[in-house]
Image (tube, rainbow, N blue to C red):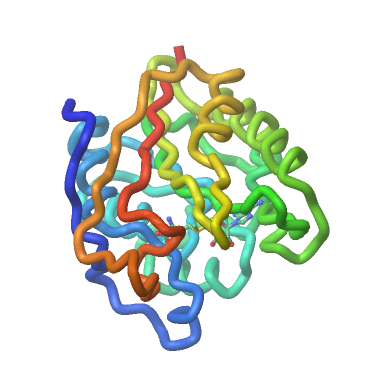
Amino acid sequence: MKTIITLSKIQRREIPERFRRDDNRFSETLVEHFLEEYTRKGDIVLDIFAGLGTTLFVAEDMERIPYGIEYDEQRCNYIRENLEHKENILHGDALKLFEYNIPKCDFCLTSPPYMPKDDIENPFTAYSTQGSYKQYLQDYGKIYKQVKQIMKPGTTIVVEVSNLKNHGEVTTLAWDVSKEISKVLHFEGEIVIKWENVNTETNDGIYGYGYDHSYCLVFRNK
Ligand SMILES: C[S@@+](CC[C@H](N)C(=O)[O-])C[C@H]1O[C@@H](n2cnc3c(N)ncnc32)[C@H](O)[C@@H]1O
């Protein structure tokens, strides 16, 4: 597999007006790329931070079986309204993965909620409680320990994440997340996604975070 790929950041799926201000989806092209590489028809595909459902919708279009968890109830409802496998999107918390009745999965693709290192709001409660960067990183360990249990042996887990440039400071989020998850899953390496259709000068919301690339961290459940 190539370790640098170029994809368009433009999302094909129209979303309702109410979600457009916080549109932090990845593009369908990213999901298609990894599903082609790591899955076959009929496989179970998991996204534990389902967002507005990109992984799940593309999985369904490609005749895979989607499962997802989303913390935000409105986002979850939106996915449920538009997914064929309606019962497979759960309103819940990735930190409590064990509590849900999710079958053993063949592939996991997700993009977590981000946190700059000096923030004090916890991304894993949709920024509704206080937190710290240290706690946030530790939570990745708790979450991915559970992901490991839910995945079939030998399967692949991909996490899309970027470093963050914020007011002249860089949060090395991608490095830190890979280090944390590596404690529980085998790190196979990173794939650099070079995003097209991104304007880093104006930070016009097409990508953001001060970069025109992100990383897909590839782990294996050995
Ligand atoms: C970057 S977005 C994912 C976007 C998704 N890849 C897409 O294309 O639609 C991260 C999502 O994780 C959700 N989230 C945050 N904390 C969570 C948690 N503890 N459990 C499950 N979902 C959570 C957020 O509400 C947000 O929708």
Q: Nearer the viewer, residue 70 or 199?
A: 199
**Total of numbered circles in the picture?**
0
- At x 36%, y 46%, the residue is 214
Q: Is residue 1 visible?
A: yes
Q: Is residue 40 visible?
A: no
Q: Quadrant of residue 53?
A: bottom left
Q: Residue furthest bottom?
A: 17
Q: Residue furthest top?
A: 222
* Quarter of the rendering occupied by the N terminus: top left
Task: Using the image, determine if residue 44 lies above or below residue 68.
Answer: above
Query: Which quarter of the rendered image does ligand 1 occupy?
Result: bottom right
- At x 29%, y 59%, the residue is 27
Q: Is residue 55 left or right of residue 138?
A: left
- At x 54%, y 40%, the residue is 172
Q: Residue furthest right?
A: 130
User: Picture coordinates of residue 213 (x, y %)?
Assistant: 32, 49
- At x 30%, y 33%, the residue is 191
Q: Nearer the viewer, residue 103 or 8?
A: 8
Q: Quadrant of residue 52?
A: bottom left
User: Picture coordinates of residue 222 (x, y %)?
Assistant: 45, 11
Task: Using the image, determine if residue 3 lies above or below residue 122.
Answer: above
Q: Nearer the viewer, residue 218 or 98?
A: 218
User: Picture coordinates of residue 190 (x, y %)?
Assistant: 35, 29
User: Picture coordinates of residue 195 (x, y %)?
Assistant: 25, 54
Q: Residue furthest front?
A: 168
Task: Using the image, determine if residue 52 lies above or below residue 120.
Answer: below
